[in-house]
Structures are given as structure tokens and as C-alpha cells.
Image (tube, helix red, strand yellow):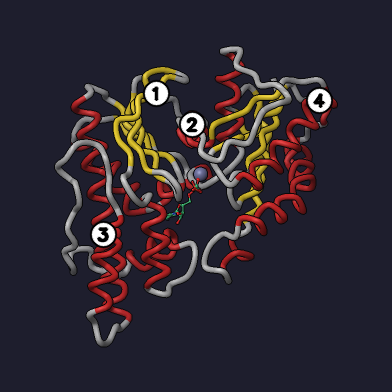
């Protein structure tokens, strides 16, 4: 079964072609980051217009790279939330047109769930497992009990982890998006140079990142001169704080819930400090740790196609009324 998958929930237009759900024949991603950089963040109306400009060429490129024709497709999958409603609509309209004209099933996919399924593309996590889902809009600890069966153990009470990276970078005038920039700077800094408090590290499974962001802002605001050495130390210390909170809670959730396996998902899982710490500390505790390859961490359509494969197996298809749901929950 050949699935065409489409992802347009935020600022990446992506189309992928998958064979039998786990073999990625193509995964084309067109990012709008360069375009939004000058605004210091994503401008939703402009994002949807950019998706409209590139959606058809990106779909064609994905088919060409996979050496597949429209007539070969067995199903079309698309993210229908959460995300920016105008952006989501572009992908949904394209997918509906393809489904209708080829008379093939349409599969609406939850973007958060798709991030989790990036772990099924080159690995096979043993169920049940704990997934730390960290993106620009969401931070949650999820127990994946079975395909399609989730228990959300905790979530952020304020900023998402990626949002904290982006806001701190904006405040330090480092550029957008903040995650990859701070990650790069942190490699040159001393993570123990500044001791920011680790909020809620001992309490439950919920997170709070707004306090860390404020602590960095206050620390920076009190400095009269900021040399490049201090800047890399701030980046490294901030990153280390976020990583420690995320890692500690994920491992505790696995132990408490007697899960032997943990997985990482979402854009922040591209963070080198987080990848290293979760792998090392998880393995120290005897856990099996799954981390998707870098190109599958940030938004992409391959993860959407992978999830669609499992949904199709359960007979979960959508109809042509499939709506864009900006605040779709897991
Ligand atoms: O999952 P994603 O691509 O989009 C959403 O669904 O939100 O995540 C984007 C987020 C942004 O906040 C970005 O700064 C963050 O992921 N991110 C990173 C890194 N790469 C992307 N955060 C920390 N370190 C990185 N290397
Ligand atoms: Zn995402």
C-alpha cells in the first residue's frame, strides 16, 4: 500500500510517500523559516499563503522522488490539527481533492500523535512506552499504551519547551527559531556556569518553563556588559536546566509506571543536549531509549504517513468533511 502524506500545520510544507507505512520513499520538506525570520516569529496569514504557493510542487516532487504516480496511491493522509488553522486548511484541501478525484481513503491525522510515530519509522518501540513530546507549541509526557491508546501523564502549565527556547533567544537577540541557535551556542559554553532553578523538578509530571525564561531575562538584564563568553555560558546553562527537568521527569515516569522503554518526539528532540542526556541517563537506569533521526524530529510528512498506516489498519478513515482543528488534543 502506497500512502501520500501531507503536513502543513505550521511553517513547513511537507509531502512524503511511504510504502507499507514504514518505508519512506520520499520526504520533501519546504521550510518557511527564512521568510518569517525578519518578523521574529511566524506570521500566520503569511504562512498559509506560502503553503498555497508551494503545496502542489512539493506533492509532485515527493511523488517524483518516490518514482510513484497518482494512480499508484492507495490512501492520502493529512494533518488536521493542532496547528494554525489557515495553514492546516491548505494541506487538508489538497488531500481532499486527491482523495475525491482518485477515490482513495482520506486519513486525518493528529500532529502530536504523528510526532510520536516518528519513532516507528526506523525503530519499533516496545509497548507500553513513555514518550516525551516536546515541540514549539506542546510539552507533554505521554504513556503510549497501545496504538492509538494514550494516557497524558503531564503537560506544561505555561510555555512549551520549544517556546521557551524561542523566547529566550529572542530576548538575547540571537534570532529565530531559538532552539537550534541556542543548541549551537550551548556547545561552546559551560552548562554549570549559572545555576538557574529547576522548576517543579520534584513534583509530579507537569512542567513549567516560563519561570526559567524569566530567570534568564532577569540575569541578563542585571549585566552591564555581555561578552561572547558569557553569552555561550547563559545559553549552555539555560539549555542544561531545561534538559535536566525534561530528562528527570521522563525517567521517573517510566519507573513509576513500570515501562522499560522511553521515546522522544517533537521539534525540541533535535536538541543535542537533550538527545545525549536522555540516552545516557535512560540507559544508566536500564531503559531502552528511542530517539528519531534529526530529519524526523521537526515537522515532516513521513511521520504523518507512518501514523496513517496504523490508523488505516484499525479502519480509522475520515470523510470529506474533515475539519481543521487548531486546538486538537491528543
Ligand atoms: O515540532 P516542531 O517542528 O513544530 C511544532 O509542532 O511546534 O517544533 C518546533 C520547535 C521550535 O520551538 C524550535 O525552536 C524547536 O522546536 N527546536 C529546537 C531545536 N530544533 C528545533 N529546540 C531546541 N534545540 C534544537 N536543536
Ligand atoms: Zn510539530
Q: Which residue is mark 2?
A: 113
Residue under circle 3?
Answer: 212
- Whole-angstrom CA distance, mark 1 to mark 3, is 29 Å
Question: Of marks 4 and 2, which one's residue comes earlier in the chain?
Answer: 4
Residue 277 place in picture, x, y as percent: 27, 47
Sequence-first tag of 1 and 4:
4
Q: Tell me if label 4 and label 2 are in contact, CB under 8 Å.
A: no
Mark 3 / mark 4, whichever is N-terminal: 4
Give the alpha-carbon distance from disc 2 to disc 1, as whole Å: 9 Å
Say which label, 2 or 3, has the lower sequence index. Answer: 2
| Quarter of the image that includes the C terminus | top left
Whether label 2 lies within 8 Å of ligand 2 gets the answer no
Q: Residue 247, position in %: x, y?
A: 25, 43
Asked if the residues shown at circle 2 and circle 1 are in contact, with their CB atoms under 8 angstroms apart, the answer is yes
* Residue 147 vs residue 327, the one in the foreground: 327
Q: Secondary structure at mark 1?
A: strand
The residue that label 1 is drawn on is 150
Amino acid at each position: 500500500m502506497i500512502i501520500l502524506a501531507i503536513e502543513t500545520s505550521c511553517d513547513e510544507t511537507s509531502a512524503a510517500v511511504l510504502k507499507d507505512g514504514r518505508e519512506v520513499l520520499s520526504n520533501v520538506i519546504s521550510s518557511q523559516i527564512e521568510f518569517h525570520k525578519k518578523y521574529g516569529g511566524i506570521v500566520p496569514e503569511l504562512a498559509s499563503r506560502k503553503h498555497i504557493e508551494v503545496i502542489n510542487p512539493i506533492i509532485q516532487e515527493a511523488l517524483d522522488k518516490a518514482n510513484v504516480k497518482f494512480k499508484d496511491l492507495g490512501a492520502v493522509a493529512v494533518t488536521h490539527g493542532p496547528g494554525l488553522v489557515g495553514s492546516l486548511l491548505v494541506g487538508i484541501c489538497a488531500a481532499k481533492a486527491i482523495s475525491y478525484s482518485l477515490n482513495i481513503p482520506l486519513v486525518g491525522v493528529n500532529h502530536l500523535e504523528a510526532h510520536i510515530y516518528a519513532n516507528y519509522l526506523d525503530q519499533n518501540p516496545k509497548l507500553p512506552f513513555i514518550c516525551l513530546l516536546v515541540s514549539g507549541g506542546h510539552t507533554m509526557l505521554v504513556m503510549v499504551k497501545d496504538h492509538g491508546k494514550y494516557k497524558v501523564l503531564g503537560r506544561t502549565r505555561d510555555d512549551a519547551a520549544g517556546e521557551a527556547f524561542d523566547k529566550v533567544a529572542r530576548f538575547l537577540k540571537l534570532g529565530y527559531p531559538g532552539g537550534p541557535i541556542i543548541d549551537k551556542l550551548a556547545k561552546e559554553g559551560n552548562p554549570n556556569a549559572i545555576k538557574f532553578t529547576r522548576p517543579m523538578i520534584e513534583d509530579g509530571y507537569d512542567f513549567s518553563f516560563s519561570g526559567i525564561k524569566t530567570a534568564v531575562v532577569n540575569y541578563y538584564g542585571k549585566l552591564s556588559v555581555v561578552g561572547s563568553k558569557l553569552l555561550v555560558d547563559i545559553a549552555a546553562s539555560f539549555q542544561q536546566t531545561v534538559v535536566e527537568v525534561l530528562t528527570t521527569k521522563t525517567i521517573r515516569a517510566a519507573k513509576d509506571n513500570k515501562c522499560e522503554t522511553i521515546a522522544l518526539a517533537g521539534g525540541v528532540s533535535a536538541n543535542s543536549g537533550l538527545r545525549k542526556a536522555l540516552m545516557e541517563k535512560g540507559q544508566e537506569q536500564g531503559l531502552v531509549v528511542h530517539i528519531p533521526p534529526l530529519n524526523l524530529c521537526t515537522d515532516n510528512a513521513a511521520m504523518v504517513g507512518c501514523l496513517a498506516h496504523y490508523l488505516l489498519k484499525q479502519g480509522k478513515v475520515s470523510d470529506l468533511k474533515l475539519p481543521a482543528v487548531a486546538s486538537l488534543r491528543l
